[in-house]
Amino acid sequence: MYRPVLLVVAGICFLGWSMMPNVAHAQLLSREAAVQLALGQNPEVIAAQKVWEAARARITQARALPDPELALEYEELPGVTRTGDFGERSFGATQTIEFPLKWWRRSQAASQAAQATRLAVLEMSKLDIRTRVKVAYDRVLFAQKRLDYILQDLQLAQNFLQKAQLRLEAGDVPQLEVLRAEVEAGRAANRLAEARNALSMAKAELNTLLARPSRAPLEMSGDLDYQPIILEMDKLQLLALERRPDFLGADWAVESSLSAQGTARAALLPDLNVGLFRQTIRGAAGEGNFWRVGLALDFPLWGAAQQRGELAEAKAVAGQAFAEKNSIRNQMVLEIESAFLDVQTAEKKVLLFQERILREAERSFEVASRSYAEGKATYLELLDAQKTLIEVREEYAAALFDYRSALYRLERASGGPLR
């Protein structure tokens, strides 16, 4: 009776393994190598890079002088179209020279805005991608560990099924125990298929972050392990104030808004217009060529309302920048506190598994296996011990994953690696 079930289970295992990606040509990746690969080709990082480049291009625009104005003027024409019979002709150029403070403030605002964009957009995008890649990398490791444990569970279930059949033939156990063993072997095969699907999805997520085809083969060189680290929340908060990109970018945005406010004030100062013309005058004595130089000041008398409006707008933008900086600071402190507590909670779970739960589950399974072999325990007791051990191992791997994920979130919240 048990042979058809074994054939079905073996068929499921073979089909599952045949559908797995071929890792013979898989790219061997460490965690840091995966991060660097993502930073180089992830579309989100590339888009952030282009946003920064656009901000840098605005610096050149802000530093550009007003375009010169060329003029050609005819006077004393006998007719509108008879320009060759002019009495006086002037040809030259006029250049507006802004008040130096206005040009300097505008250039400074653009440069500071570009720096704010680099930090708040590009560097923050890199920090986010770094965190997401690390989490995705460890999720693949966790899915692989879970798959290994379920494979062990399936092998044990098949072995127990064979032993139960032998004991049934010897008359030591009832038929019900063999049927239960067959059911458990089938359930283990189903869990194996689910675990393989979870592993495939985890690899697809990581490949997507790496800007690779979702089904591209991957081979991981890292492992889920517990790395204790001494953390102090106050120091992490101070560290975040020094290196968190979006907070530093908000600081630069405040400086840029203040420079823009200075630009609006400087707009109330006059600009200088310089003109240089070549004049040709025809008279009774003949034709003469002369030079004409013109100087003029542009006073914003009638348009002062525009400058006052620009100044009011600049003040409002500066106030907004201050408020956004404070909001980022508050959110940053909250993220650090939340991630810090998550790390502590996850660490306690990992230590509890290492010091007690995992050892007790392994010891219980050893005792149950020995008792079952000696005929002192039923198959149901052995099955419960086996299931408990597999569940504990999976839960331990999940606790490791949660701990490392919490560390990565804390790294992002504090603005960089934790030493």
Image (cartoon, helix red, strand yellow):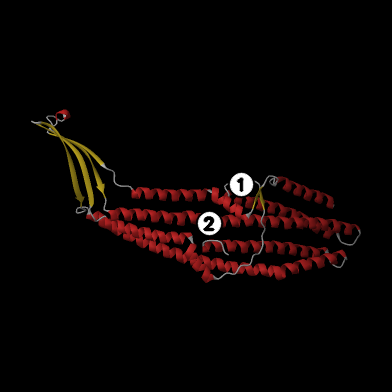
Q: What residue do we see at 56% from left, 56% from top? A: 130
205 left or right, relative to 187:
left
- Which amino acid type corresponds to the residue marked 1 in the rendered image? Ser
In this rendering, does residue 10 appear at all? yes
Instruction: Say which residue appears at 47% left-offset and 65% top-offset.
Output: 241
**Furthest residue toward right:** 170
* Residue in the picture at 76% in, 66% down: 362
Residue 398 is situated, as x and y percent measured from the top left of the image, at 66, 62
| 45 or 150, nearer to the observer | 45
Among the two numbered marks 2 and 1 on one chain, the one whose residue lies closer to the N terminus:
2
Q: Which residue is mark 1?
A: 214
Query: What element does badge 2 sit on?
Result: helix
Do the residues under discs 2 and 1 have CB atoms within 8 angstroms?
Answer: no
Which of the 4 quarters of the picture holds residue 229? bottom right
| Image depth: mark 2 or mark 1 in front | 2
Seen in the image, is 246 located left or right of residue 311? right
SS for tag 1?
loop
Alpha-carbon span between mark 2 and mark 1: 20 Å
Q: Which mark is residue 128?
A: 2
Q: For residue 81, say whether it is visible.
A: no
